[in-house]
Image: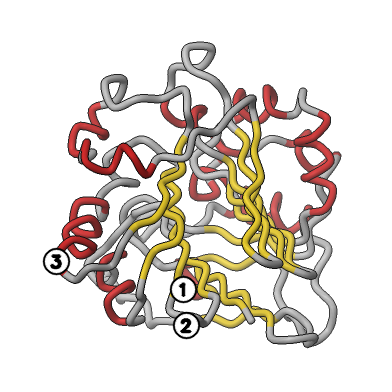
Amino acid sequence: MIDIQIFEVEQGFCAAIDRSDRHAILIDCGSGSQFQPSQYIWQKHCHSLDYLVLPAYTQDHLAGFPALVNQSWQHDIPIHFLVANPTVNTEQFSAFKRFPQSLDHSLINLTDSSQTIEIDELKLSFFWNKYPDFQAPHNLSLVTFIQYRDINMILPSDLETDGWYNLLQSANFRQRLERVNMFVAANHGEETGYCQEVFNYCNPEVIIVSNKKHQPLSPQMMRQYNSHAKGAPLGVSEKKVFTTYEDGSIVVSKYLDRLRQITTQRKSRPSFDLN
């Protein structure tokens, strides 16, 4: 079985892949007042983090990173491997100043412009734009594809339109897009992360948006993403677009040979006095 959880965070993004064996894979280190990656690892009684993927290189996406590393050291929860864009280093972006040099030995040396890691039936594939061809942090985001049985998900982090266009030049990238049935919107679902041409190759059942703090998806982008999602089979999901603003944390689960399933942890929204 597997659970892929996309957390409701206030800064950046964070997702976890839980394989029910007290091991976990964490993608990004965003955090919030109600969520910290370090707390999640501790509360799940994880024995180790098999992989820690750092796909984005801004302060908000790395907000929970120092606490996670401290938790790892204090409670002997080893981080076996780190994955990041191999063309980016700690001197290029201020957000990496707190990156502990003692973890350098854990960095996976990604090669070429893509790489796939296999863990039993789980496959993680990574694509990236190269520095200095791209210098803006968003377009250097590491794009992650998750494949597990009938789950094919893409997490493009903060990728923006120019970055999408460049990756679309790769036939391998386009082929991966064609398999996607669960699409996590880039850059919190904002217009800057949207690329119409992506959906010439990708026809997802469901689109998931990790919103910024207290910022719902704009009506325009909601219409766009609804038009691109074809809907999941009966029993998987009744919605085509999920947002952490409306739905809270979102979990995609797969148990044995059952259909994948999407569940949410809806939270009540704060009310605002407009008087």
Q: Amino acid at mark 3?
A: Gln
Reading the chain from its start, which is encountered first: label 1 or label 2? 1
- Of labels 2 and 3, the one closer to you: 3
Is residue 182 rendered to the left or right of residue 117?
Answer: right
Circles 1 and 2 in contact, beta carbons < 8 Å: yes
Q: Quadrant of residue 268?
A: bottom left
Which secondary structure lies at badge 2?
A: strand
- Rendered view: 60 above or below 45: above
Q: Is residue 115 left or right of residue 190?
A: right
Q: Which residue is mark 1?
A: 249
Q: Which residue is mark 2?
A: 265
Amino acid, disc 2: Gln
**Residue at the disc numbered 3:** 74
- Residue 209: quadrant of the picture: bottom right
Q: Give the numbered dot on residue 66.
A: none
Picture coordinates of residue 222 (x, y %)?
Answer: 63, 56
Q: Residue at x 57, y 25 (%)?
A: 129
- Name the N-terminal-most of marks 2 and 3: 3
Residue 178 on image: x %, y %: 84, 47
Residue 251 location (% of width, % of height):
55, 76
Compared across the picture, whether 122 is left or right of 273 comes to: right
